[in-house]
Amino acid sequence: MAAVANMPVSDLLKSFKLKTKQQELLIRVSILCLVYILAFITRLFSVLRYESMIHEFDPYFNYRTTLYLTQNGFYDFWNWFDYESWYPLGRIVGGTLYPGLMVTAALIYRILHFLRFAVHIREVCVLTAPFFASNTTLVAYFFGKEIWDTGAGLVAAILIAVCPGYISRSVAGSYDNEGVAIFALLFTFYLFVKAVNTGSLAWSLASAFGYFYMVSAWGGYVFIINLIPLYVLVLLITGRYSMRLYVAYNCMYVLGMLLAMQIRFVGFQHVQSGEHMAAMGVFFLMQVFYFLDWVKHMLSDTKLFQAFLRITVTCAVAVGTIALGLGMLSGYISPWTGRFYSLLDPTYAKDHIPIIASVSEHQPTAWSSFMFDFHILLFLFPAGLYFCFKRLSDATIFIVMYGLTSMYFAGVMVRLILVATPAVCLISAIAVSATVKNLTVLLRSKNKGVQTGSTKGSSSSKASSKALLDQSQPFQKNGAIALLFGAFYLLSKYATHCTWVTSEAYSSPSIVLAARGAHGSRVIFDDYREAYFWLRQNTPPDAKVMSWWDYGYQITAMGNRTVIVDNNTWNNTHIATVGRAMSSYEDEAIEIMRSLDVDYVLVVFGGVTGYSSDDINKFLWMVRIGGGVFPVIKEPDYLVNGEYRVDKGAAPKMLNCLMYKLCYYRFGEMLTEYGKPPGYDRARGVEIGNKDIKLEHLEEAFTTSNWIVRIYKVKPPNNRW
Amino acid sequence: MAREKSSKDNAQALFHSLRSAYAATPVNLKIIDLYVGFAIFTALIQVVYMASVGSFPFNSFLSGVLSCVGTAVLAVCLRIQVNKENKEFKDLPPERAFADFVLCNLVLHLVIMNFLG
């Protein structure tokens, strides 16, 4: 025993000593594990502060469909006709959604139940996005390894784990398509670049499956099906084409297109829509191009080949233009839809499609948003582009194109910063990794130089070169250390910023509001859920609720009642009808409401709490959308000198329209703030103009404790004598 | 007259040199070329049929044409990978190339069968 105790520590350590390669592997694996866990836990702020619930509006629809899927099975889900929304039209849910997210969550739920973890589907839904964010970091590592080297891969994984641009749409509770779609996007791109690098049919097949998953998950797949043909075109033009490119693109295109057409929502768009024609065009171009290449290889005489080339090219171009022209003129190939056309022409939506223009996420991006979401990545991005151009290969050309196109789109629409985030993280990772690598090489080379100088004998030339090296080396070493410290300082600032942004800006559930009370204590407003549960428990099961389309998904998911319009916004006229009802006088509105069988009206009002996303602030959009279909609603009627007011100087139509009455009913007697008169609207900061409101055809059914949600019942018509 | 004759001569010379160059390719590549030609021919027949009787149901037409085009394209990829003259693929054993070809065709036809309707 004493002998064992006497065993020196150094022997013990020697038994653990690993070779350098194994040490490196251990470091890499442990870094990846830590990054995986970090990506997951940094998204859990709202679960820890509030509770595990679904955020915002769209995720409630996804949650409801996932619930339906787990309860009724895939066949019923795929063929589901929902009669509880868009009354009286209904909605063909099976054919109008992207099933990827729901099927993924249901699969995870089934696996967990199979392993005897009895979790509720809501918990699975809440935590799906962080789980896939962690998987994205792994894909980013492999992608970085493919483009540059393992160091860049590790930095890319770390950067994308905390980048606010990605966190904004993938926090716990944000159960939306983007949470899964960004993983699918990066995965597809990685598999395609791997296929181009190896030229293997197996990798191309994998990338076709990745594309299929992306198509099933998000409408943004159009970006993939346009970027990859563009990339192929660039490679063809710059002369970097090879046989591997042919194998990769063709297999991916044909199989990917076929798989994508299995999703009913996408349908035949791959052969009929203008947005997908680029891929088909490049497909045919490739066939012609490689055929000519093959013929050139077979023919030894160049003159004959020139003749053949001329004939073939003219034929191909003629056939192609005729086919395209016929298709577009006859309307068979539909032009670019409004949603994507507004990306190419940002002013289009504002003039022609008010619904798209009204969404706050569709506005052009300000520089502050870029800085907020990217921080140091903003200036690391051009540095990374420089490194990519220094070492051009098929893979770096791809990432440069992805970065540039996605940054353009991110500038057009705020929401698309999400698509640019993986590219920015990867390119910045290349910059960071290459810089750090060069600096540490400088640090290490100095040591080696000193050693060789001291051991070897020196001829005069060697002595002079050694002296030169010795002279510049002290500055090099100090400079390298200073730069390395600078780099680490920047990266640590980035991490701090990202965590702060996640905590302050992107972790609010939107359905539960928090504010600071008078003494600094936290006050929680849970009015939305209070109102929806009131609806669920106190109204007849077949009651129909009219509200603005923002709240439709939440009302059907939590209140379990039929709604007139919801967030799907597929029927502009129906929404305009609701907008018209909200902006008309009560007598006209009751006609519209009776024709739609409305039983309850729900409005959101922020005057008591100072909540600024309420219906009075959204009212002008209701007027615009309603006025777009029914010319009887004119926007200038509600404005005074072009100004939107709710106080005494407001337009008379504004003071008497249905929305005003419903929001401010009984508000004239309310004391909201110390020292202000009764009826002081805290969200607008004015005293309201019409305090004496009488309702004739509606009666107040429920107002939540902080007056945020107000529900009114439509009175049945009077008995006839 | 002279120009016509020279262009006709050109065409004939082109045709002859193509023919002689093609005759030099190995037999296994010629078999693959025959398969590709057969698949494209079948696709053309389907398109002509669609043009004469109309395109309903569209998914059946698409699945038929795309199965022919898909298998032709995959066969061309196989030919590229098996061809001894391609330096990029000299490390790839032809058995592996053929296995990939079979796997991709399997996936292609499974999807086609689902899509036929």
Image (tube, helix red, strand yellow):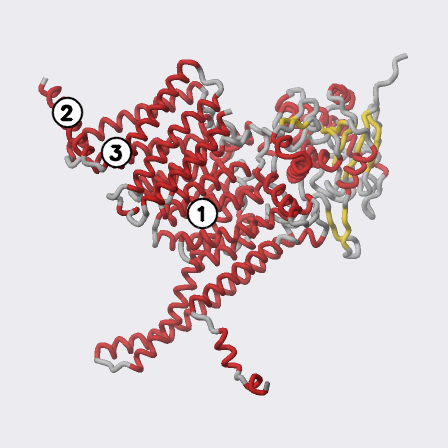
Q: Residue furthest top?
A: A721
Residue ID at (32%, 44%): B94
Residue ID at (42%, 73%): A478
Disc 3 target residue = B30
Depicted A476 relative to depicted A185: above or below = below
Which one is nearer the viewer's eye here, A544 or A644?
A: A544
Q: Residues within 10 Å of mark 1 (few under 14, many from 20)?
A: many
Quadrant for the N terminus of chain A, please: bottom right
Disc 1 target residue = A190
Say which label, 2 or 3, has the lower sequence index.
2
Quadrant for the C terminus of chain A, please: top right
The disc at residue A697 is none
Q: Quadrant of residue A69?
A: top right
Amino acid carrying label 1: it is: Tyr
How far apart marks 2 and 3 lie (CA) works out to 23 Å
Residue under disc 2 on the same chain as residue under disc 3? yes
